[in-house]
Amino acid sequence: MGQISFKSVGKTYAGGVTAVSDVTLDVAEGEFIVLVGPSGCGKSTLLRMVAGLEEITDGEIDIAGRVVNRLDPADRDIAMVFQNYALYPHMTVKENMAYGLKNRRTPKAEIEARVAEAARMLELQPYLDRKPRALSGGQRQRVAMGRAIVRQPAAFLFDEPLSNLDAKLRVSMRMEIRKLQRRIGTTSLYVTHDQLEAMTLADRLVVLNGGKVEQIGKPLEVYHRPASTFVASFIGSPAMNLLDARVEGGQVWLGGAAMGPAGRAEGPVTLGIRAEDLRPAPASQGVALKVEHVEELGSGRVVHGHVDGQALAVSMAPGLPIGDVLHVGAAPEALHLFDTTTGRRIETRTRAAELVL
Amino acid sequence: MARLRGFWEGSSRNPAKRVQFDRPLTPWLFVLPQLLIVAIFFYWPSVQAVTSSFYLEDPFGFGSTFVGMDNYTDAISSREYRRIAGFTAFFAVMVTALSLSIGLLLAVKADKVIRGASAYKTALIAVYAIAPPVSGLIGMMFFDMHMGPFTEMAAWFGYEMKVGINYNDTAFALILVAVWKQIPYNFIFFLSGLQSVPVSVREAALIDARSGWRRFKDIVLPLLAPTAFFLLIINITYSLFDTFAIIDVMVKDKPANNPMTLVYKVYLDGFKGNDIGGSSAQSVILMVVVAALTVAQFRFLERRVHYG
């Protein structure tokens, strides 16, 4: 019912600027897909192409078995939640939710029932007769969700729906959205620039950069095996350490210390290590980190410093003593190697190591 | 009245934005120039008009006699006065309805134009820069009985148009010129009103309703209501008062029996007929009617207007 498939979809504006290129993706029924990337990466454009608010200049988008390239937004059987909610200011909450159904000639009783159900789910019953301006940001957000839910569409499209809320509300709304989507089971596309939101919400992540797909995968897959230096630096906080290193004699060398084995031809590589994968090590095995600054987070601390003139961050448990120089190392499977020119991942691990992951 | 004030003050309803003055007289100092202008050009002549409406003035300025309400009863019981009042009402309704609807239509279309939008808008707005007497003159040229293009166009259909002689033809020409002159004003306001409708609200509507007319009627029009309400009052006032110059240019020096509005009759009776008292009475009646109309609009119509 609610599958969406993208077949080498692209968007080039009249001026010749390419916003999205060659996106191929199959979204399964009921799946929660998050499109994530920095601003200007084309994620919103891609979502708006699905909605029909932007023209598709290349390829095909297929929603629930129909190619929608030429269909009006109203005919695509999608519902969208906008960043600034886009509620109709002159209509009450109830009218806002009912409007899309009324235009589709849904019987009155049916509209009533669906609005009542959505209001119950979203705890909006007390506000049904209010105008949007008499609601708080979180309530408006819920109304926008309600407007989408009552439609019972093939897919929900979310365009950064939480970015106008304060941090605390954002976390709780994030969980609500996820719970709601699980319960209703409607296929969802969700756009955000917040990698944490992306990680916590997604069944699968689509990381976009410069209008192209960098990586598609489950959140942990993307986290543990980033396909490029871009993904490595974008997903995860603090960002993965990326350092210039060399492979010599089957070992990765960083600042005069052998970090671990690398089954790869000799030469320069970009070495990626997550801050939490680095551990204090005996001076003979680890690499020397010149400590410059310690961030206390309460639950832990992040030590910032330099190795061989390159910035490195290390997550450490609280309470461990930190001197001026810290020797750190990482397990061989926590080392990520990337090509220095293309930035793509270099597979070094054996199949067995992958299975462990 | 609180709502009326809110209408004009706009965003300053927000108490945080209110300016506090240390000395109570300072704010009065700032509004003094405006108050002076209003007093000199509105209150003083109004009081003068009300006073002189109770007197019968000698045409040559040799004294005046108190006549009570005679000037009022004379005006209202006059058949000619009632006929002109009837035309004025018709004229006001036609001019307001046509210039509002055409202005809105053009604004909606201009709002959709992407390429060459500014040239298009400038062309539409430019008309507003024309002074009313000049637009009257241009209108006269268009309807000239010997060489006016509109007269010729009518002739193609076998109709002999006699603006300035035939009552209906003149009425038609007056309305046309008055509407033409007012369209740009309405256009500017409607266009800026349209552009203040949030893009995302329009997009949400695009997903909710297939029909463009429905989207316009259900979403855009209600959001334009404050603009439309403001324009309605301005347009009625325009058609009643500001069309004076157009009428003057098009009707003056023409044989009699031409349509005119009450304002023009006030002028004719007062300055051509030298009946200051009668003309004052008429202008007081007009003032009361327009004030009542405006109050009624605020009372009954504004309630339906949603201010974003």
Image: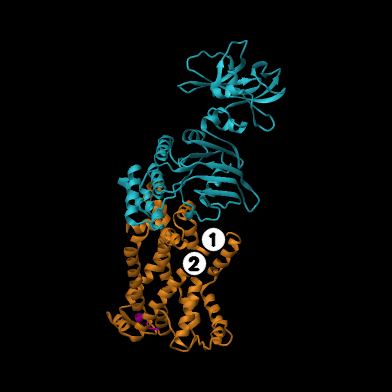
Chain colours: A cyan, B orange
Q: For this rendering, which residue is in front, B18 or B117?
A: B117
Q: Position of residue A340 (x, y in %)?
A: 68, 29
* On screen, residue B110 above or below B264: above
Kindly identify which chain the residue marked by label 2 belongs to: B
Task: Answer with left or right where residue A153 lies relative to residue A213.
Answer: left
Kindly identify which chain the residue marked by label 1 belongs to: B
Amino acid type shown at disc 2: Leu
Q: Position of residue A210 (x, y in %)?
A: 61, 41
* On screen, residue A17 above or below A319: below
Mark toward the start of the polypeptide (2 vs 1): 2
Task: Answer with left or right where residue A29 lies relative to residue A281.
Answer: left
Cα distance in 3D space between marks 2 and 1: 11 Å
Quadrant of the drawing holding the C terminus of chain A: top right
Residue numbers of the magenta segment = B274-278
Q: For this rendering, which residue is in front, A302 or A126?
A: A126
Q: Residue at label 1? A: B112
Task: Answer with left or right where residue A156 lies relative to residue A10.
Answer: left
Q: Position of residue A95 (x, y in %)?
A: 36, 54
Amino acid type shown at disc 1: Lys
* On screen, residue B297 above or below B86: above
The majority secondary structure of the magenta stretch comes to helix
The answer, for residue B25, to whether it is visible in the render is no
Task: Answer with left or right where residue B89 lies relative to residue A192.
Answer: left
Graded by Cα atoms within 10 Å as few (under 14), some (14 to 19) or many (20 or more), the crowding at tag 2 reads some
Q: Residue at label 2? A: B105
Residue at screen point 44% across, 57% down: B209
Residue at screen point 50% across, 63% down: B108
